[in-house]
Image (cartoon, helix red, strand yellow):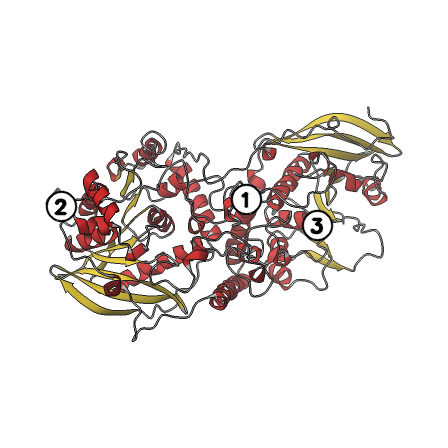
Amino acid sequence: MLTMAAPLRVLPEGQRPDDVRLGPLKDLNGYFPFTPPATTREWARRSVQVRRQMLVTLGLWPRPERTPLNAVIYGRAKHGDYTVEKVFFESVPGFFVTGNLYRPARVKGKVPGVLCPHGHWEGGRFMNASDAEVKKQLDQGAEFFKNAARSPLQARCVQLARMGCVVFHYDMIGYADSVQIPRSLAHGFRTQRPEMNRPTGWGLFSPQAEARFQSVMGLQTWNSIRALDFLVSLPEVDPKRLGVTGASGGGTQTFILCAVDPRPAVAFPAVMVSTAMQGGCTCENACGLRIGTGNVEFAALFAPKPLGMTCANDWTVEMPTKGFPQLQALYQLLGAPNRLMLKDVTRFGHNYNAVSRAAMYEWFNRYLQLGLKSPVKERNFHLLSREEMSVWDQDHPAPAGGPEFERGLLKWLDDTARELLRRTWKQPQAFQAAYGRGIAVTLGRTFSEVGRVTWAQAGVENGDGWRLRFGLVRNKTHHEELPAVLIEPAGAARGVVVWITGRGKAGLLEPDGHTPRSEVLARVRQGWVVIGADLLEQGEFRPDGQPLRRTRRVNNPREAAAYTFGYNYSLFAHRVHDVLTLLRLAKGQGGPVTLTGTAGGGRWAGAALAVAKGVVDTAYIDTEGFRFANITDLRDPDFLPGGVKYGDLPGMIAVGLPRRLALRGETSMPEIIRAAAALMTRPPQIRLLPAPASSPAPPAPANP
């Protein structure tokens, strides 16, 4: 038993909780295995969950409206049995996708369409390898023609056109003719830009952009979706025979697009699908995207449609034994074992060379029903110059770009996303689908996913009409552990109050560290059990006893949030998970559950309401005016990727409105909370409380 002179501790001095979250952060070079499902029903559930996670974190939930492409196709040049044209169109108003369109010289009826994202080859679509590199490729037997060695990208497009496909070869953001957002930013971002980190007029990679799920990867994915829109708008393209293929970063674009868009019929992501490195470029990472999943599972979302891949002597080298067997098990389960293929080209380094392309040609020949004699053999071709490929000229001047364009683009995306979300305010199911599911992904855990929670008692202290039990709340499912207190009335309990504060369990106790504060005792004497705990990085989590000022980040020199938060939940999300764990413990006590958040804890308690819908009967939330939109530091303990997107903190409270809500810290009732209440069959009782004169004591919970 601790003496009354010492602050209450559950663990010995200097010992931290046994919590998996105190371990090393995961990064893009971690291990990302895929566990195949045991049943088709299990996969149906899991695939919906992962696809939704992708759409939310890529900024595509709800999916933006498709604005007019205003496509321009010009400059047709014939090269024997195929033609090449120049193309640009708007994926959103004023933001251009650029590329070249390869078509068979003669087209009869409907033919397949193929998208070719290029990846991080130097020059992108304008790639032109050096003489030394050409010689190396020819000497290795990786290429058979100088022109193909100069540009394996052009070689791929020409051959597919010769095979009877309409091919669109388009630019990644910042490459070749995509000039509005520079490559140095989209792919080479390294350091935060203070002038772009502000509540209005923000730029990419800023806390404001990340809080809205705005990223280069999301923009590129939307460009790919619109590129499919462009392709199927061509009268000769068969919308039921669409293929996508790219390597390296183009491989990433391939499997991401094919996971979130149902239209492609066949896919061939080369040298990118693996359980190892997940994509090193800023354009391949987005906050929240790969938490609990990875590239192999993303590729698996294409099943049971035909999926071909290659592995090389790079991060994909172990794919034959790590990743591919699990994909085979999935395809076997879905009754399509022959629709999966891995071409082993590990004798070569990172590539999309002639040997790899040959495997792709056979795959597309088969599954795009081209009817060509096998094997399909690549032939030499006319190598296009930069001038022959570029879409911008005197008659088609390049559009304006730069910082002001960047700010305007992100503002337009934010404005239109808010308008789309606002349209759901009149329909309960649409509101919960858009906001509820989006916030669930943002926070990363729902009450149903909490798992098994236990209480391990360490000691008891008794007072006048109350008993204080202290111990560890253990989440066995997720290996998380919280030092906690349970303050009980002398008689029978009428219910449980989960009380969250900015100081953890110490926020419920007087300065002596043992006596419950007067406002807590008031609840206990009314017959309520009060539960409080040190959330992650509070109280006994802190060796020095001081509040955490800045969160950890992975060991990456570039200051892009996605390198950390693309693979790890934010501290804010983890603290919401802890609130859910406490709610699970409270629910097991029997009786109604009240959730209270004061003195800095209102933000976590309020957010938890969104993912604990139906669990909390009464909530007292002091928001203190907190908004994610005001956070200007990616390492702020309250930074939350996506936190602004779905109505900020008021949106989270609105999604999980309990039967009774007392709200403090707001100058007026947030509009979204009023709208959500109006949608409910049984409108909740909501009170807006004035700012407290002194101690922020919550009102007594009403009788259930």
**In the image, 455: left or right of 513?**
left
Closer to us: 595 or 68:
68
* Mark toward the start of the polypeptide (1 vs 3): 1
The residue under label 2 is which amino acid type?
Answer: Lys
Which residue extends farthest top? 1
> Can see residue 682?
no
Q: CA distance from mark 1 to mark 3?
A: 19 Å
Q: Residues within 10 Å of mark 3 (few under 14, many from 20)?
A: many
User: In the image, residue 163 lies at what x, y percent?
Assistant: 15, 52
**Residue lying at 36% horizontally and 62% vertically, measured from the top left:** 178
User: In the image, residue 537 lies at what x, y percent?
Assistant: 67, 39
Q: Which residue is mark 3?
A: 602
Q: CA distance from mark 2 to mark 1?
A: 48 Å
Closer to us: 289 or 204:
204
Residue 444: which disc? 1
Q: CA distance from mark 3 to mark 2?
A: 66 Å
The residue under label 1 is which amino acid type?
Answer: Gly
Q: Which residue is mark 2?
A: 377
**Residue lying at 29% horizontally and 76% vertically, measured from the top left:** 395
> Can see residue 107?
yes
